[in-house]
Image: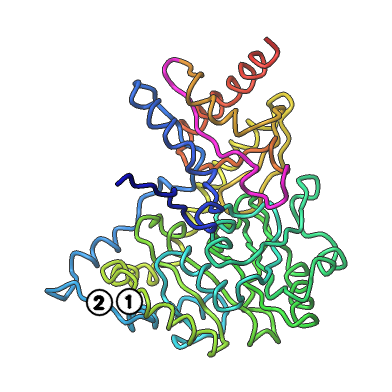
Amino acid sequence: MEKTSKKVEISLRAKEMPASPIRKTEPYATAAMKKGLTVYGLNVGQPDIETPPAFFEAVRNFPGKVVAYQRSQGDLEYLEALAGYYRRCGYDVSEEDIVVTTGGSEAIIFAAQATTSVGDEIIVFEPFYTNYNGYAVMCGVKLVPVTTRAEDGYHLPPKKEIASKITPRTRAILVCSPNNPTGTVLRREEMEMLAEIALEKNLFIISDEVYREFVYEGEHTGILELPGLEDRAILMDSISKRYSMCGARIGCVVSRNRELISACIRYGQARLCSPTLEQHGAIALTRLPGTYFDGVRAEYRKRRDLTIDALQRMDGVMCRKPKGAFYVMARLPIDDTDEFAKWLLTDFHVDNETVRVSPGAGFYATPGKGKDEIRLAYVLENKRLERALYLLERGIKEYNRTQVD
């Protein structure tokens, strides 16, 4: 008997899951390196500053003989250490207000799932951390973008413009400061404006503060500093960038809304626990002196200044000097930076060297925006960074010549 069958279809959610612009050029970068090319990575925020030795020392001295499951909320000693860290930041929280997560990524997912139902909406300011798009697909929610402009330093538009995006399905405002990908540090009055909207419209505020320590001019304002938001302010955080610990995958959700924290703990129970050894090692990191960040900030400020000086000298390139994080969005004299980012890895090199960048469209939710922009992460030491920026300038010129030809 002849058998017939239809094609098995993957889910609509799976089909809609976007590729990350930070990582989707990976096959081309791998192929370039296999051909013997050196690829300078400006595409991903992977710091090259050494992880503090205190972490490794703590892991070497782990007291257990079995790496067992941890509590779903997090290691008790680590929760206490985190609460102390946040109190030093000026946030009135206790360990009961914190849930340890498997990276900042899980913190964002937990916060979104705890505040929205399928079909609900979250206000977000574009350009934004590209993976917010993917998390929204996972959670079945819609990101409603409010566009910020390079000409304004990517600061927030007026209150009226933000409020006009709110619908009956809006449940939260998602904000990131210092910002990935723009490096913008929101002013206190901007954060206070968002707090006013959240109170007036009965919304949560989800605040991504992963880059809190990386502020070069001005001051960071955390959402937990602002009064009157006890039931609706949610902090998402991670040790990845703060201590050069991207591979450790330890983050957290912080909120004084105990019902929300209880929900996040139950989400945590479903995935059992976050990594045991990494939590143990991270306890030591919370005890580092404040002077540790002074040196790190000074190094990134040098890299920022080198990057901006180089970009602003390039013909047709427009960017603003970021005041925080370690990223910059740059507008190029190129129509499609997706194609350009690929071309840099497949068709371009100087002395067997090339550069990898993140195309800008993936940092937006509005179709068509960002196609002439790239995000650069200035996470290489200065000599390598200088070489990477030289290659970028050469690449822009040569790519545009190929388009004319």
- Image quarter hosting the C terminus: top right
Quadrant hosting residue 29: top left
Q: Residue at x 20, y 75 (%)?
A: 68
Disc 2 target residue: 69
Disc 1 marks which amino acid?
Leu
Q: Farthest front residue? A: 1
Secondary element at image label 1? loop
User: From this viewpoint, is residue 23 visible?
Assistant: yes
Q: Is residue 187 above or below residue 37?
A: below
Residue 272 badge: 1
Question: What x and y, as percent, mark residue 274?
Answer: 34, 71
Q: Compared to 373, does 292 lie above or below?
A: below
Q: Are marks 1 and 2 in contact (CB under 8 Å)?
A: yes
**Quadrant of res 116:** bottom right
Q: Is residue 279 above or below residue 338?
A: below
**Is-magenta flag for residue 282?**
no
Tell which of 77 and 118 is nearer to you. 118
Question: In this rendering, would 189 be left or right of 63?
Answer: right
Determine if residue 216 is in view: no
**Category of crowding for the residue at label 1, using alpha-carbon neighbours closer than 10 angstroms: few (below 14), some (14–19), many (at least 20):** some
Compared across the picture, whether 28 is left or right of 176 comes to left
| Secondary element type, mark 2 | loop
Q: Looking at the picture, how far across and down is residue 38, in whole percent?
A: 39, 26
The way the protein has been coloured in the rendering is: rainbow
Task: Report the magenta residues as a range.
Answer: 351-368
Nearer to us: label 1 or label 2: 1
Q: Residue at x 58, y 47 (%)?
A: 327
